[in-house]
Image (cartoon, rainbow, N blue to C red):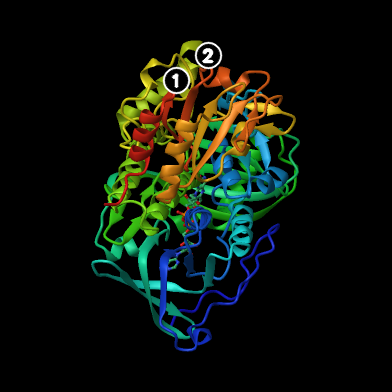
Amino acid sequence: MHTPKADPRPSLYYPYRVYSPWLPSSAKGQPQSCTVAIVGAGPAGMVTALMLAQHGVASVLLNAECQVSEGSRAIVFTRRSMEILQQVGVAHRVVASGLPWRFGNSYYRGRAVFRLEAPYDPDDRFFPMTNLQQQYLEEYLLDACAAEPLIEMRWGNKVTAVAQARDLATLSVDTPEGVYEMRADWVVAADGGRSGIRAALGLSMEGASYEGRFVIADIRIDLPLPTERLAYFDPDWNPGNTILMHREPQGIWRIDYQLPETESVEEALRYESLKARIDAQLAMIGFAETPWELDWSSVYSARTLTLADYWHGRVLFVGDAAHLLPIFGVRGANTAFQDAQSLGWHLAMVAKGLTPESLLSDYSAERVGAAREIIDEAGKSTRFMTPPTAGFRLLRNAVLSLSLTQAFVRPLYHWRTSRPHAYMQSRRNSPGDDDALFQSGPGHGDPPKNVHIGPNHYLLDHLASVFTLLYFSQSSPLPQSLTEVVEKHRNRGMPIRVLIVGSAQNNFGDNQVVADDSGRVRQCYGIAADGAGYLLRPDQHICARWLTLDADRLDVALRSALPEKR
Ligand SMILES: Cc1cc2nc3c(=O)[nH]c(=O)nc-3n(C[C@H](O)[C@H](O)[C@H](O)COP(=O)(O)OP(=O)(O)OC[C@H]3O[C@@H](n4cnc5c(N)ncnc54)[C@H](O)[C@@H]3O)c2cc1C
């Protein structure tokens, strides 16, 4: 019998709400079945559910706990994550309560040695980074799920086993009333880093785990410092190690420091140990007298691990269940959003019977490719933050000491922030389009480029979670021959929206228009003449583009973007 924690988790600033568990008796003995069962209502599970719902696919979210996650956990959300959160309708809430930022400072032995400046141009709706505690983000996603009739949330339901047949999976779900069985056409394993589903299927991950361990301590303190990422290398009070500091909303600061190799987790999390180190850090930055209170603390170590395949029969892995990435460079939750956005449309198209199941191998290949790229990048940051061997330590120390006098080594401090993966090798990219002929603009597999169109008005505001044909024309609607191709694919169920990037002055018939009177969208997308086009997938990545669009090549691209079921 599963007994989820019934008391609200402790917090100085976040009022945890405990939800009532879903009990099998409420189903009055009805057999339990669903199209998609999502195991785990963390960020990955909830964004997947919201994406599926946008395609009309119902899901049941099963969550072991009865409240959102403990502690701030992921606190830095990237611009791309914000664009994904805009797609599922919660970005405005993150903007309203989060802290935007774009600068970072690195110090070595008390001296400032590197200032990070994340690019931010007027075409960006969102800042490069926004700080917000994970509990708030989960709360906003929960509210969005609650408002969606196609999503059913079952709190206090812990999946304990999964059995697979050819075309369905059966989950054993433990509740405060005992176990019931749930049949699902598809199971999304979004059950986090310690995924029980991954263990139940006997899957192991590839990659490396690093020895270095870090304490995360969230404290409430009034520090008159801007929202910037602060990194202190080799400070006097913790020689050879690294300390990171981040401002969070609600007057909270995260202090993140490396532990000596021999210290146990229990010792590290003892209040007296935490206090001594936090006091030392505050003293070092000139705030020894400022009072503070501890909110939450935890210990983590860096891992760069991924499953080699995210698709196993009726089960698909997403988020931390699929991979474990170091948090340096803010990769955990930010990568989970990109997985969920991708899985949402791939699985929806399969679940609706619009395309062969083999589309799911594209989800897996694309996101495993992303994880491997991240692992490669994150491995470099991790080896710098926590050198795994004497050789790496020697190299790092050389960089640190040289940086005091030599400007050329300072960029090595750059922590390689999480960035969206480009699906350049995707099988969804169209053969025979004009991708190679473009001089500029986002190409095959790239995420879209946002463009400022007017006051509080951006190109991505117009993109829904469907395939989007951007047709560039100043004066005329989509030609009849292209309209017929679009209609043909709509008739087989493919969700497609046509957007004319044109002028507010002209009449484009039934076509929706993005007014581009300044020509900025055309400029950003490398368009010189009318009649050009871009095809975007439901996750907004580019899969085809043409300098001059014609009916035959549009047909090829749409067939390649969503293969037809025979
Ligand atoms: C201590 C800590 C600090 C972190 N700090 C950062 C950070 O600073 N920056 C960053 O980017 N990332 C950080 N992360 C990582 C980040 O929190 C995760 O990457 C992110 O939460 C992944 O989301 P997810 O939905 O995949 O998994 P999770 O958020 O872990 O969600 C999994 C969900 O599945 C549920 N579940 C588990 N097992 C079952 C089951 N058998 N049945 C039903 N439900 C189940 C859990 O209750 C949970 O709700 C941190 C993580 C931890 C643990």
Q: Is residue 166 left or right of residue 249?
A: left
Q: Nearer the viewer, residue 104 or 561?
A: 561
Q: Which mark is residue 528?
A: 2
The residue at 39%/60% (across/down) is: 188
Which element type, helix, strand or loop, lies under badge 2?
Answer: loop
Residue 524 tag number? none
Q: Nearer the viewer, residue 474 or 386?
A: 474
* Quarter of the view holding residue 357: bottom left
The number of callouts visible is 2
Looking at the picture, tell me which residue is in the foreground, 329 or 367: 367
| Mark 2 and mark 1: Cα distance apart in space | 10 Å
Residue 429 lies, with reference to residue 302, above or below; the image says above
Left/right of residue 136 with respect to residue 345 in the rendered view:
right
Which of the two discs, 2 and 1, labels the residue nearer the N terminus? Answer: 2
Label 1: how many Cα within 10 Å (few below 14, some 14–19, many 20+): some
- Quarter of the image containing the N terminus? bottom left
What residue is shown at x 40% (from left), y 71% (from top)? 159
Which label number is shown at residue 548? 1
Residue 296 location (% of width, % of height):
60, 56
Residue 306 shows up from this direction: no
Pointer 2 and pointer 1: residues touching (CB < 8 Å)?
Answer: no
Q: Nearer the viewer, mark 2 or mark 1?
A: 1
* Amino acid type indicated by mark 2: Ala
